[in-house]
Image: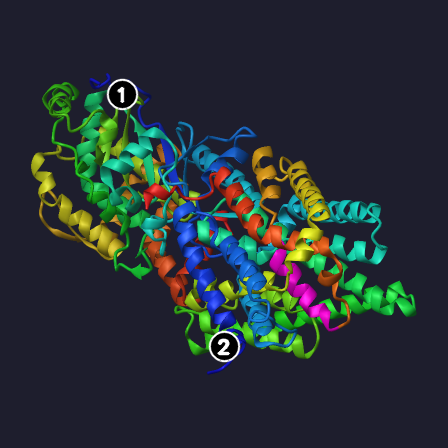
């Protein structure tokens, strides 16, 4: 008879995913809460109950699968971004920049005032700028929403994620280069890394549709070809040590804008995509520990509230100029709440560089957990209040 | 509600209504964004009129009342430019076309307005399948009697308008082989088809409308979905068979053709309309929907077989003096061009072949609507 501990380690992940999925379905049916919130909650509880069973290292299969799941979502996300719109209606980009910059400033200020070292405060502030593309896109697809809040949230998330990755890399670079103390070196290093990631995604974004067109499979489904593209890209980003986030996002963007062909993919990459999403959202909180969450709860909540208010206000401020009502502008800002998955994966990537921020920073653990569970609910409410979701009784 | 009296209006004035598609620029499917678009448009004076339609992925625009082609076409162009600009600001594609080629009717959302909700409840899936886009043309009439005379005299020309405007070859992702598949959705409604053969307004009012109202089947003229129906409160007849063309220029040309035809018919040189004209009506209409300009008509008086394209060309030539008198020559010439180059349905099929996808077809329709 094998040791119970060994069995649990073997079964940990499959069980956690199955349980998370089942709870997600049931809770969604009963309460209409977003499924991903439930995945996060179940994942966190399981990780507390069976810490050994849900362990994952930077190079574990689970981490790789989570990165892949995130890559698929980012591709789909990038495909929905219309760069031309940002050019025609500059207020979208302006509100994105303002909202990100204000969040960075306010979060840095608060954490600095609580006596945190400046570098830690900077990292925290750069992470707080971001919004989780995974959380937002999953809620939008789940609710089948359409309208200005939906469109604008997607574009703002893209903007603040690119900014967050960039600033985060600059700060990390600064940290790494601290001995030589060269900020220019840190900036250029980060820039090169971002450019290489973007270039990789862009190249693939031209090649895959071209191949599909050649195969004459355009009228059919591009799901498998694009999924394979994402798998390749995530592996390459790992191999070359560049940002998989930016690479897959650019892949989607390029596939859309190259217009070699109009291709269709299944929403969420079909059933397999859904499965990977469950894993992703369980994974995102599995690294958090209860003690840290409790310890960082106070500061975490303060920072979250500040981030929430700043984002909502900054986006709302430009809403009228951007062509929508103040109300919809405010709801757009409110819908920018989720951030966990993005943060967890970004940190995971940085862990092996010797920066273990989650472990040091209890506030971040609390923020991640809260936003993983609460963030999608807030986004969902914002979409419903904006009347951008179909009324259920009509189905 | 009893039938309101027919309000006399200046004969041969015209007005155009167009139902337009709102399309997502990400996946080219219809998108429920009319509330956002209407909000933005309400901030500035609109050159004409814009209103919500039954599903949120559709809006309707209409022109003012015009007497000639150049005024009408320039107002429609101004409306189009305003719409395109607002659409760009909100990342919404706007286009013509009688159907959206691959939308699923079950995905449509009904605009929150009591009448639309009622219609939706009464007709069930028909209401959502009714996500189709048509052009309506109004022509002013001096009296109700004139209106009914024109209505029945025009029945012979209804296939012309179907073929010339046809722009709905695809439905739910498949080529229907029809040029105007849109009208098949209209025929599903119980009150669709032709108006009853009555030539006096008083007869229509007392021997048809009030009886129908008494049965409880209808409440007002709005409940009739006829191909041509009188609109007493405007003092017009309304031609409703046209698909929304891909360009506003074609919409204006169709209106001018109808205007010229009415001028010609009011001279009363043609044999008077008769109930028996309708013997071939449904067959001719089917020919126009299915084969477009390549269809074959049966003449309602002589029963001879005619090529629809030839019949249109002959009629257009006959209309030249009337077009010239009304200032509509350019519009008639535009339609002459259509008989040579093919309809919008033909253009859309070409775009499908070129791009290999229904999405490519919608993208081309958006570009064409912009005038590019």
Is A11 placed above or below B207 here?
below
Give yes or no for residue B286 being in the magenta stretch. no
Q: Disc 1 designates what residue? A: B142
In the image, residue A339 sits, relative to residue A257, either above or below, namely above
Q: Residues within 10 Å of mark 1 (few under 14, many from 20)?
A: some
Q: Is residue B236 left or right of residue B329?
A: left
Q: Residue furthest bottom?
A: A1
| Rendered image quadrant of residue A215 | bottom left
Q: Residue at x 57, y 63 (%)?
A: A47
Q: Which residues are magenta?
A: A339-352
Residue named by callout 2: A7
Q: Are marks 1 and 2 on the same chain?
A: no
Residue B7, quarter of the rendered image: top left
Picture residue at 65% right of the left edge, 62% below the top: A344
Residue farthest toward the right in the current orientation of the protein: A180
Residue A351 inside the magenta-drawn segment: yes
**Residue drawn at the location 28% of the way across and 38% of the way down:** B120
Q: Chain of mark 1?
A: B
Q: CA distance from mark 1 to mark 2?
A: 90 Å
In the image: residue A316, left or right of residue A273: right
Q: Answer above or below: position of A280 versus B218.
A: below
Label 1, secondary structure: give it: loop
Secondary structure found at label 2: helix
Q: Mark 2: few, some, or many residues within 10 Å (few <14, many ≥20)? A: few
Mark 2 — on which chain does it sit?
A
Question: Percent x, y for residue A155?
Answer: 60, 52
Residue A107 shows up from this direction: yes
Q: Is residue A258 above or below residue B107?
A: below
User: Disc 1 vs disc 2: which is toward the camera?
Assistant: 2
Q: How is the image coloured?
A: rainbow
Q: Residue at x 53, y 47 (%)?
A: A377
Q: Is residue B259 visible?
A: no
């Amino acid at each position: 008879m094998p040791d119970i501990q060994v069995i649990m380690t073997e079964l940990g992940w499959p069980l956690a995913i199955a349980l998370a999925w089942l709870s997600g379905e049931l809770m969604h049916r009963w309460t209409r809460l977003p499924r991903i919130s439930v995945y996060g909650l179940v994942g966190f509880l399981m990780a507390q109950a069976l810490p050994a069973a849900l362990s994952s290292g930077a190079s574990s299969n689970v981490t790789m699968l989570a990165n892949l799941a995130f890559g698929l979502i980012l591709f789909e996300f990038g495909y929905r971004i219309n760069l031309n719109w940002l050019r025609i209606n500059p207020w979208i980009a302006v509100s994105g920049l303002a909202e990100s910059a204000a969040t960075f400033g306010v979060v840095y200020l608060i954490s600095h005032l609580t006596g945190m070292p400046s570098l830690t405060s900077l990292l925290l502030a750069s992470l707080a700028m971001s919004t989780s593309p995974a959380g937002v896109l999953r809620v939008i697809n789940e609710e089948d929403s359409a309208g200005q809040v939906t469109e604008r949230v997607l574009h703002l998330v893209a903007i603040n994620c690119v900014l967050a990755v960039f600033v985060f890399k600059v700060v990390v670079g600064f940290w790494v280069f601290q001995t030589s103390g060269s900020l220019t070196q840190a900036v250029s290093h980060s820039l090169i890394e971002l450019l290489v990631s973007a270039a990789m995604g862009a190249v693939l974004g031209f090649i895959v549709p071209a191949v599909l067109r050649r195969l004459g499979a355009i009228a059919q489904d591009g799901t498998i070809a694009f999924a394979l593209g994402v798998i390749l890209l995530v592996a390459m980003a790992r191999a070359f040590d560049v940002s998989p986030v930016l690479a897959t996002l650019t892949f989607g963007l390029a596939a859309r804008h190259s217009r070699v062909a109009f291709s269709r993919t299944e929403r969420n990459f079909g059933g397999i995509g859904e499965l990977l999403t469950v894993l992703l959202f369980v994974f995102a909180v599995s690294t958090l520990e209860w003690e840290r969450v409790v310890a960082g709860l106070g500061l975490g909540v303060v920072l979250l509230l500040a981030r929430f208010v700043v984002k909502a206000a900054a986006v709302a401020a430009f809403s009228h100029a951007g062509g929508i009502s103040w109300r919809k502008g405010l709801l757009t800002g409110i819908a920018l709440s989720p951030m966990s998955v993005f943060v967890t994966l970004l940190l995971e990537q940085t862990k092996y560089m010797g920066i273990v921020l989650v472990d040091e920073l209890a506030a971040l653990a609390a923020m991640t957990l809260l936003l993983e569970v609460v963030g999608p609910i807030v986004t969902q409410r914002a979409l419903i209040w904006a009347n951008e979701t179909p009324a259920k009784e009509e189905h | 509600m009893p039938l309101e009296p027919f309000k006399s209006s200046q004969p041969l004035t015209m007005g155009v209504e167009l139902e337009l598609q709102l399309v997502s620029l990400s996946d080219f499917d219809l998108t429920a964004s009319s509330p956002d678009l209407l909000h933005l448009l309400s901030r500035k004076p609109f050159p004409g009129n814009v209103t919500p339609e039954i599903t949120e992925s559709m809006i309707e625009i209409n022109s003012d009342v015009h007497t000639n082609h150049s005024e009408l076409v320039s107002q429609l162009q101004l409306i189009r430019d305003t719409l395109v600009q607002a659409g760009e600001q909100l990342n919404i594609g706007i286009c013509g076309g009688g159907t959206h080629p691959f939308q699923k009717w079950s995905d449509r959302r009904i605009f929150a307005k009591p009448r639309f909700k009622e219609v939706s409840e009464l007709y069930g899936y028909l209401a959502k399948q009714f996500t189709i886009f048509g052009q309506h043309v109004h022509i002013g009439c001096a009296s109700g009697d004139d209106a009914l005379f024109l209505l029945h005299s025009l029945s012979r020309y209804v296939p012309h308008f179907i073929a010339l405007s046809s722009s709905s070859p695809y439905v739910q992702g498949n080529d229907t082989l029809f040029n105007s598949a849109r009208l098949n959705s209209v025929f599903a409604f119980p009150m669709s088809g032709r108006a009853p053969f009555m030539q006096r307004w008083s007869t229509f009012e007392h021997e048809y409308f009030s009886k129908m109202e008494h049965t409880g089947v209808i409440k007002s003229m709005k409940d009739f979905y006829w191909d041509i129906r009188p609109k007493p409160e405007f003092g017009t007849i309304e031609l409703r068979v046209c698909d929304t063309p891909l360009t506003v220029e074609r919409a204006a040309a169709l209106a001018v053709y109808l205007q010229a035809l009415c001028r010609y018919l009011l001279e009363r040189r043609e044999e008077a309309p008769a109930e028996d004209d309708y013997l071939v009506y449904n067959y001719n209409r089917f020919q126009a929907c299915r084969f477009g300009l390549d269809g074959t008509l049966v003449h309602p008086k002589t029963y001879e077989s005619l090529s629809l394209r030839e019949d249109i060309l002959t009629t257009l030539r006959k209309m030249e003096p009337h077009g010239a008198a009304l200032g509509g020559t350019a519009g008639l010439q535009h339609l002459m061009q259509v008989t040579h180059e093919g309809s919008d349905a033909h253009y859309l099929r070409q775009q499908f072949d070129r791009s290999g996808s229904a999405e490519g077809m919608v993208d081309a329709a958006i570009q064409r609507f912009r005038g590019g």
